[in-house]
Image: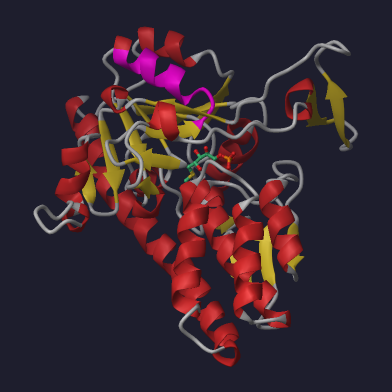
């Protein structure tokens, strides 16, 4: 997508051919700053501190983190140690585990002398695949927006509500939930996006608003609790969000607060879509509420808030009383029954075991063979 009119991705290999460039998302929207990752520890820190975030991008950074680790030592032990270190950075997004498994699978059979080149090739391929997948999600999701536009008699605008940031900043490019919106906007469908601020880290107010603005998509930032009110008043035609892990039966883990939006959508008959690349499906889990690990983060994300003063200085201030305990849950799980449909790179399906298997038949358990 574009930054100040110039196309770019959220991760790249620098001209030196080995170090890895990222956008420091902790500095947005007030400053656009890029960083150069040169070691495994820097890659792990970037994920943990959320300089990079969003399930697909976390996977891509982890893949390049393995490359950086192998530059010093490409032994079996070093490969395993790098994967274990990166895996421990964030627990909820399953794309991290998926990307590390892909890297292990590609690299383990090779001799240490062959691994470094192969690692960079595999990490680049995973990144390119992410871009292609998200573009396909965009095409399939576009159909849903076109239907709403047709239903409205091509009058007014299509109002979409989204939560957190599932845009190009959360992926290598395009985004998941935002990919259909970019395509719809580019096609000339009058679109307006309600952007949930997404406390405590404000990925909506800081990142989604910024990237929609860079692309010229009309949007309005709202406090997290506004969505239900807007839905009651017919101001939301559809909701679309991303996900960090979706189970085999279609339960969806996403940024904290997603569940409440899905409940409000159900109560108001507003379609609630979840856009996801297939690496976000955890085929090993069924019951998301019971089994998806939910990240709990540093309480300071909740007690403190950052913003820019009129002078341009970015400062952090405290919003809770000294001494009040806080709990900072990063994600929640929306049960499949509240999801109207899943939008994947292979098409749109019901949020159910059968729905997912209709698009991914290779995942259907083989009966009678003991496997
Ligand atoms: C394509 S991104 C889908 C999700 O990763 C996104 O909605 C989200 O919850 C991101 O959480 P974050 O904590 O910012 O990494």
Say which residue appears at 34% left-offset and 28% top-offset.
157
217 vs 50, nearest the viewer? 50
Q: 252 left or right of 367? A: right
**Location of residue 271 in the rendering, given as x and y in whole percent from the top left corner:** 28, 24
Asked if the magenta segment contains residue 259, the reply would be yes
Say which residue appears at 51% left-offset and 45% top-offset.
93
**Location of residue 121 in the rendering, given as x and y in whole percent from the top left corner:** 50, 80
Q: Is residue 9 visible?
A: no
Prevailing secondary structure class for the magenta stretch in the rendered image = helix
167 vs 237, nearest the viewer? 167
Say which residue appears at 47% left-offset and 42% top-offset.
244
Q: Quadrant of residue 269?
A: top left
Q: 95 left or right of 38? A: left
**Location of residue 352 in the rendering, given as x and y in whole percent from the top left corner:** 22, 35
Q: Split into 4 quadrants, where in the image is the C terminus?
A: bottom left
**Location of residue 104 in the rendering, given as x and y in whole percent from the top left corner:** 50, 71
Q: State whether residue 189 is above or below residue 155.
A: below
Name, please, the residue furthest toward the bottom: 113
Which range of residues does the magenta coloring cover?
255-266
Q: How many marks?
A: 0
Asked if the magenta segment contains residue 72, the reply would be no
């Amino acid at each position: 997508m574009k930054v100040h009119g110039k196309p770019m991705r959220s991760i790249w290999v620098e001209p030196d051919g080995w170090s890895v460039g990222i956008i420091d998302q902790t500095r947005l929207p007030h400053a656009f700053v890029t960083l150069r990752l040169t070691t495994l520890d820097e890659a792990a820190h970037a994920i943990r501190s959320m300089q990079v975030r969003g399930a697909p991008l976390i996977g891509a950074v982890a893949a390049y983190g393995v490359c950086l680790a192998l530059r010093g030592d490409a032994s079996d032990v070093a490969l395993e140690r790098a994967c274990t270190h990166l895996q421990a950075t964030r627990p909820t997004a399953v794309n991290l585990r998926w990307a590390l498994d892909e890297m292990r699978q590609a690299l383990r059979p090779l001799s240490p002398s062959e691994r470094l080149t192969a690692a960079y090739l595999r990490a680049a391929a995973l990144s390119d695949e992410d871009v292609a997948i998200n573009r396909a999600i965009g095409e399939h999701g576009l159909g849903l927006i076109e239907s709403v536009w047709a239903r409205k008699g091509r009058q007014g605008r299509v109002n979409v509500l989204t939560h957190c940031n599932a845009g190009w900043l959360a992926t290598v490019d395009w985004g998941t939930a935002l990919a259909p919106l970019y395509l719809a906007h580019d096609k000339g469908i009058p679109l307006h996006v309600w952007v949930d601020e997404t406390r405590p880290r404000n990925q909506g107010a800081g990142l989604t608003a910024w990237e929609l603005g860079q692309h010229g998509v009309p949007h309005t930032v709202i406090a997290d609790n506004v969505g239900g009110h807007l839905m009651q008043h017919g101001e939301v035609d559809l909701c679309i969000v991303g996900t960090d892990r979706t189970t085999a039966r279609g339960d969806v883990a996403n940024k904290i607060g997603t569940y409440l939006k899905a409940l409000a959508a159900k109560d108001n008959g507003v379609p609630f879509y979840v856009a996801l690349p297939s690496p976000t499906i955890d085929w090993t889990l069924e019951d998301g509420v019971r089994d998806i690990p939910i990240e709990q983060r540093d309480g300071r994300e909740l007690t403190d808030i950052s913003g820019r003063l009129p002078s341009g200085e970015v400062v952090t201030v405290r919003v809770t009383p000294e001494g009040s305990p806080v709990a900072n849950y990063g994600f929640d799980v929306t049960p499949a029954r509240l999801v109207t449909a899943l939008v994947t790179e292979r098409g749109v399906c019901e949020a159910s075991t059968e729905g997912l298997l209709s698009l991914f038949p290779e995942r259907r358990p083989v009966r009678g063979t003991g496997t």
